[in-house]
Amino acid sequence: IEEIKEGDTIPIKYGMNYFGNEDLSKYVPVYKMGPGNSRPCTITANEDLYYLIGLILGDGCTRKNGNTFSISSMDEEISFFLKRMKEEMFPENSLYIKRKKGKASDYCITNKMFMEFWDNIGCDRNAYSYQKDIPKSVMNSKKEFLKATIQGLFDTDGYVIVKENTKKNYTVG
C-alpha cells in the first residue's frame, strides 16, 4: 500500500465495505472562553455534522476572508434541519435567513470556529461549486458518516448519470 500514489488506479472488489475510521473531532480548533473571544460552537463528529458538510458542499457558499457560511434551499426539511443545527451547534450565533419570493432562501451563520474547522478538514473556503470535492478527512470516515455527507449532497443538487458502455458513474452537483 505504501507504493500507491495519488492518481493510481486500483481494483477494489465490489461489496468489500472498506471504510475509514477518521474522527473529525481532532480538527476542531481550541478557543479560550471569555470576553472578547470568538463565540464558540459545539462541533461533535456525528451524522448531523457530516450531513451539514454535505449540504455546504452541495448548495453552500463560503468566502476565503469571511467566517460565514450560507446554504440556499427551498426544501422545508433542510430549513428545519438548519434551524435545529443553529440551536444545537451555534447557540450563541444568529441564523440570518434571506427569503426570496418564489426562489430558494439563503440560510447564513457566521462562526469563526466552524470556519476554521472547515479549513482544517481540508475544504476550500473560496471554491466554486464545480471546484468542490469531498475532503479526504471525510472520505476516510466511518460508513454512516460518509453516507450522511453523500445524503447532504444529494438533498441539495446531487444526481447520478449512468452512461452506457462506460465503466464510470458520474455525479455532478
Image (cartoon, grey):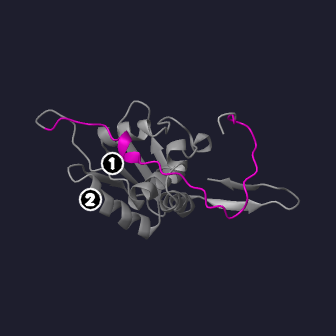
Q: Main secondary structure of the magenta part?
A: loop
Residue 65 pos. (x, y %): 40, 30
The numbered disc on residue 88 is 2
Residue sitting at the far left: 35
In the image, 102 versus 10, the foreground residue is 10
Nearer to us of marks 1 and 2 is: 2
Residue 40 pos. (x, y %): 23, 44
Three-letter amino acid code at the position of disc 2: Glu
Q: Quadrant of residue 106?
A: bottom left
SS at badge 2: helix
Q: Quadrant of residue 112?
A: top left
Alpha carbon distance from label 1 to label 2? 13 Å
Q: Which quarter of the figure is the N terminus placed in?
A: top right
Residue at image position (42%, 69%) is: 76
Residue tagged 1 = 109
In the image, 94 versus 38, the foreground residue is 38
Q: Magenta segment: does it hold 61?
A: no
Residue at image position (51%, 52%) is: 59
SS at badge 1: strand
Three-letter amino acid code at the position of disc 1: Ile
Give the left or right position of residue 53, taking residue 90 as reference. right
Magenta stretch, residue numbers: 4-33
